[in-house]
Image: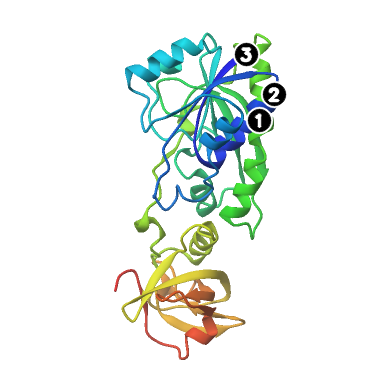
Amino acid sequence: MRVVMFGYQTWGHRTLRALLDSAHDVVLVVTHPRSEHAYEKIWSDSVADLAEENGVPVLIRNRPDDDELFARLKEAEPDIIVANNWRTWIPPHIYGLPRHGTLNVHDSLLPKYAGFSPLIWALINGEREVGVTAHMMDAELDAGDIVVQRAVEVGPADTATDLFHRTVELIAPVTTEALDLIASGHTEFTRQDRSLASFFHKRAEEDIRIDWNWPAEDLERLVRAQSAPYPSAFTHHRGRRLEIVTAVVSEGRYGGTPGRIFYREGDGVVIVAGADARTGRNRGLAVTRVRTEDGQELPAAEYFTSMGGYLTGRP
């Protein structure tokens, strides 16, 4: 089949690599310009560079809404469009242009975690599996019929970076299997159960600010979800920003006020956590490594030279 690819960052790069290695013919690539957004500078393999290295024409757009792009798409005569990590809305006159429509590849187990940063949100929420879904695009974002879906387990110590590496390896087999099904004449695929759907926004500074009213189990997953190269979850100590690099759920139960710097346990320093911490029934968050405002990383037991005081959401 003649394929036009819409994609960006490493997800789009892996998709294009899979298409170039397949029996299909990539006739045009559309990608976004480079961005200085914190999350878009991570996993930023260039789709444009890969296309140009392989002699494939490239168009760079923020949005696919101009007449020139539509004219180039019609000239390319694609049998199908394949999209992965395209960051803006694709209108119906584009996604419906090819005779086989548009196949979107998304890094979640749809219908859950449509939208942005699905691996991070899924890890924070304690999901046991994450994965990749290839589905047909329709008028609702990430809501079309599922062609192929593959899952991987989430381990108890996995970080978002671990899950990225595990799921990005699924892109090529999911994409090529879906294209082979479509090329063979399949048209009936699995409808999404919209009662199970969830849609998440892009992550920003406010999303990594620690709220000590959260249970320690949730905070521990937040810290893992914001593993390097993502920006670390942070709090404030004595008016200065303090990043929590690693942490575990405490063995003991600690009562009092959320955010209290309370007790040394093993290699960590326990911070009281949970909205109902006053009951004394909660585990705390045992912080093991921190990074100071000036970039110094050190064990929490060295940073917290004495117990007492509070970690707060704001200075």
Q: Residue at x 52, y 80 (%)?
A: 300
Residue 234 screen position, x and y as percent: 42, 67
Q: Amino acid at mark 3?
A: Met
Indicate which disc, 3 or 2, sits on the residue closer to the N terminus: 3
Q: Quadrant of the N terminus?
A: top right
Q: Which residue is mark 3?
A: 1
Determine whether label 1 and label 2 are within 8 Å by CB: yes
Asked if 231 appears above or below 18 in the picture, the reply is below
Q: Amino acid at mark 1?
A: Ala
Indicate which disc, 3 or 1, sits on the residue closer to the N terminus: 3
- What is the quadrant of residue 265 in the picture? bottom right
- What is the quadrant of residue 62 in the picture? top left
Q: Quadrant of the C terminus?
A: bottom left
* Visible residue check, residue 97: no
Q: Which residue is mark 1?
A: 18
Nearer the observer, 251 or 26: 26
Circle 1 packing at 10 Å, graded few (<14), some (14-19), many (20+), is: some
Residue 157 screen position, x and y as percent: 64, 60
- What is the quadrant of residue 210 in the picture? bottom left
Under circle 2, the secondary element is loop
Circle 3 packing at 10 Å, graded few (<14), some (14-19), many (20+), is: some
Q: Which residue is mark 2?
A: 22
Q: Amino acid at mark 2?
A: Ser
Residue 128 screen position, x and y as percent: 62, 48
Q: Residue at x 69, y 27 (%)?
A: 21
- Compute the Cα span from label 3 to label 1: 14 Å
| 169 displayed left or right of 95 | right
Asked if 199 appears above or below 146 in the picture, the reply is below
Asked if 6 appears above or below 92 in the picture, the reply is below
Residue 288 screen position, x and y as percent: 56, 76
- Compute the Cα span from label 1 to label 2: 6 Å
Asked if 161 appears above or below 26 in the picture, the reply is below
